[in-house]
Image (tube, rainbow, N blue to C red):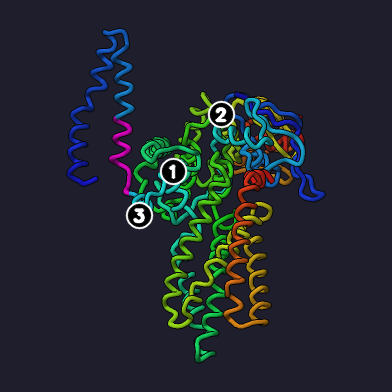
Amino acid sequence: MNLVLDHLRLSYGATPALDLPRLTIDHGATAVLGPNGSGKSTLLRMVATVAAPNTGEIHLSGLAAADDVERTAIRRRLGYVTQTDGLPGRMRVHEYMDYVAALKEIGPARLRRRWTRWALDRVDLADHSDAKIRTLSGGMKRRLSIAQALMGSPDLLVLDEPLTSLDAEYRGEVTRLLTELAATTTVVVATHHADELAAVCRRVLVLDAGQLAFDGTPTALAGRGANHVWESPHPVDGAVCRAIGPDRYRCVARHVPAGTPLADPTVGDGYVAVVRFGSR
Amino acid sequence: MTSSAAHSIETALARAAERPRFLAEAGADTGGAAGADAGRLAANFAGIEAELDAPPASRLARLLGLLGVDDRTIPLVTATPSLRRSWLVSIVIAVLFAINVGSTSSADGVDRIVVFLTMAPLIPLLGMALAFGPAVDPTHDIAVAAPLDGFRLFLVRSITVLVTSTTVLLIGSVLIPEGGGYRVAWLLPALAVTTVTMALATRFSARRAAAAVGVGWLLVVTIVAGAADTAAAFGPGVQITSLAISIVGFVTFTRRRQRLDALSMS
C-alpha cells in the first residue's frame, strides 16, 4: 500500500499554506517535522481526507481522495488522531469508543465491544473503560485518541502530535507501539519530538513555511547537524541551546565557536540546523 | 447480565482457560490442526471476556434498544452533541419562558399562544446549530475522516434533535391552558424550518443555515401576524404551506446528500 501526495498546494487567500512536490510514502513510519505553522497539521488533515488542497491530488493505493466513492474506500482504511484531542468530555470512554466504531461502520454491538477492548488494551486504558472522559488526565486522553484510531486495524494511520501531554514513560510506550504498528501499517506522524519519535521512523519530512525543507532518513537528517553542534556550560547568543543537565547546554548554530569540540548530532539537532539556517 | 450469571461464566472460563494451551501443545503432535483450533478458541475467549468486562450501556442506549432503534444507530444518537443535559435543561427553560412571557400582557392568553407558537420552531433550529460543526462537536474531524456516510450521520442527528425538541415542546403545549388546537400549531412550521435548515446545511454550515432560517421565520411571523389575527397567522394556510415547504426541504436535502461529504473536503 502506498500513499501518493501529488503536488499539493493550499492557500488561505493570498497566503500560501502548503506547496509540496510529488511525494510517495510507502509502508512503515514517516515523521513530519516542522515549526508551528509550517503546514504539518494541514498536510495531515489532507491525508486524513478532512481538508482538500486547492490543487494537487492524494491517492492511497490508487484510490483518489477527490472522488466521492473512492474517498469513502480510503476512509475505511484510515485511522486518524487529531492535533487536539477531539474528545467529548461528557461521554464515558467505552461510549466514545462505541461511537467511533459505529462511525467506522463496525457492527454489531458485540463486535464493537471486542474492538473497544482490544484497542483500549493496546494503550493500557482498559481499566478506565467506564470513566468519564473529562476525568482522564491529559496523557490518558491522548492515549484514548490513539486507541480510537486503532479501531478496525487501519492500513494507514495519520497521527498529529500523538506524544503531546504524555509523560516520559508513556511517550516511550507509544513510540514502541507506533514502531510495532509501522511493521504492518503505513504511519504518517507529525511530531515535535524529533529525537524520540522521528528517530525511529523510516523516513522524515521537514516542512518549513509550507515548503518541503528536507526529505530523507533520520540518519541523513542528523547528518545535517554535523559540524554545527556543541555542548556549552551556558546558553550562547545566536545559537539554539537546550538544557541537558545542570550547567550543560546543547547548542546548534551555523558557526561553532572556534576551538570548541563538536558533538555528535542527533535527529533533533539536524532538524534545528535545517529549519534555522537551511543546513544542506 | 446478572452478577450470578457473570460469575458462572467467569468460573467456566477459568476452568476452560487451560484448553487453548492444551490444544496448542496437542497441535504440535497433530500437524497444527489443534493449534488452529486453539487460536480460534483464544479469539472466542477474548470475545467472551470483552462481553463480561464491558460496562453497562447507558439508560438512553438501553431505552433506544427497547424502542427498536438499530444497533448501529444507537451510538450515533447518544453521541449527538446537543443531547447533553445542559441542552435539555436549556430547552425546558426556553419553553417555560415562551409559555409565561405572554401571560402577563393579555387577559385572554392570545399573546401567550402567539409567543409560544413563534418561539417553538426556533428550538429545534437551535438544536441543529448545536449538533454539527467543529465549533460544537469535538469529534467533528474524526467523524469526517470516518467512512460512515455524512448524510446518515446528519439525518440521525437532525431526527434526534427534532424528536427531543418536539417532546419537550409538546409537554409545554399541554401546560398552556388556553388556545385549543392552536397549542400544537407550531408542529408543521417547526418541521418546515428544520428541513429547510437541513437543505441549506448541504451548502452552508449548520449554524449559518439555522441562523438564516431562524431570522427568516421571525420575519414571516412578524409580517403575517401584523396583518392578521392569530388564527390567520398560524391557521390552515400557514400549516399547508409549512407542509409543502417541509416536503421540498427534505427532497432537496436528500438530492444534495453527496454535498455533505464533499463539504468535508473543503
Q: Chain of mark 2?
A: A
Task: Give the residue type that dot 1 points to.
Answer: Arg
Query: On the image, numbered disc 3 is attached to which residue?
Result: B63
| Residues marked 2 and 3 touching at CB (< 8 Å) | no
Examine the rendered structure and indicate whether residue A225 appears above or below residue B234: above
Residue span colored magenta? B45-56
Task: Give the residue type that dot 2 points to.
Answer: Val
State whether the magenta stretch is mostly helix, strand or loop. helix
Residue at 37% across / 49% down in the picture? B68
Residue at 40% across / 38% down in the picture? A108
Residue at 71% across / 35% down in the picture? A273
Q: Position of residue B184 (x, y in %)?
A: 49, 72
Q: Residues within 10 Å of mark 2 (few under 14, many from 20)?
A: many
Q: Residue A200 got which mark? A: 2
Are dots 1 and 3 on a single chain? yes
Residue B7 location, quadrant = top left
Residue B130 placement, left or right of B6: right
Query: On the image, numbered disc 1 is attached to which residue?
Result: B72
Sequence-wise, which precedes: disc 1 or disc 3?
3
Examine the rendered structure and indicate whether residue B254 appears above or below residue A7: below
Q: CA distance from mark 1 to mark 3?
A: 14 Å
Q: What SS does tag 1 mark? A: loop
Q: CA distance from mark 2 to mark 3?
A: 48 Å
Q: Position of residue B22 (x, y in %)?
A: 23, 18
Which of the two residues, B5 or A136, is positioned nearer the viewer here?
A: B5
